[in-house]
Amino acid sequence: MQPKVVATEAALQLIEKLKETYGPLMFHQSGGCCDGSSPMCYPQGEFIIGDSDVLLGEIGGCPFYMHAAQYEYWKHTQLIIDVVPGRGGMFSLEGREGVRFLTRSRRLN
């Protein structure tokens, strides 16, 4: 079975850098609102995970969650977390680095 979420080498390198600064991290795939739909990186425990959040797996040793309603749309895909230049979500830790995490996807068989 293929993992539901993976990360590119660039994303893994950034995660390691952020862990050195902030300690353990967690991710939550944003469902819209103020930051669009992007992977958000927080210090572990800074974002409250609810009963309706789904743990998709881990990237760089960090748990990656998505709201169950959004997961219904994405359940047949593998999320590929990448890094691109630019400003991302204002609440996500990588913003200070001048880059942002980006979700790409591919259909699972």
Image (spheres, rainbow, N blue to C red):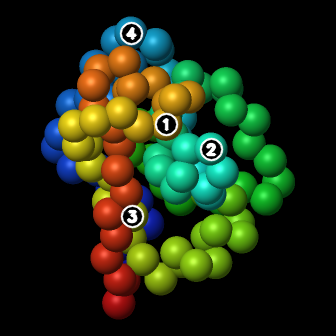
Q: Position of residue 8 (x, y in %)?
A: 21, 49
Which residue is disc 3 drawn over? 79
Mark 1: few, some, or many residues within 10 Å (few <14, many ≥20)? some
In x, y percent, where is residue 102?
A: 35, 50
Q: Would you identify the image quadrant in which residue 5 lies?
A: bottom left
N-terminal of the pair, mark 2 or mark 3, is 2
Instruction: Check disc 2 and report the residue beneath it.
Output: 34
Q: Are marks 4 and 3 in contact (CB under 8 Å)?
A: no
Q: Position of residue 26 (x, y in %)?
A: 53, 35
Query: What is the C-alpha distance between the residues marked 2 and 3?
Result: 21 Å
Real-space CA distance between mark 4 and mark 1, rounded to the nearest whole angstrom: 18 Å
Looking at marks 3 and 1 on the same chain, the residue that comes earlier in the sequence is marked by 3
- Asked which secondary structure carries label 4, the reply is helix
Between label 4 and label 1, give the one nearer the viewer: 1
Residue under label 4? 21
Question: Residue sitting at 34 percent across and 70 percent down?
Answer: 105
Dot 1 and dot 2 residues touching (CB under 8 Å) = yes
Mark 1 and mark 3 in contact (Cβ < 8 Å)?
no
- As shown in the figure, which amino acid type bears the numbered disc 4? Thr
Q: Disc 2 or 4, which lies upstream in sequence?
A: 4
**Which tag is nearer the camera, tag 2 or tag 3?**
2
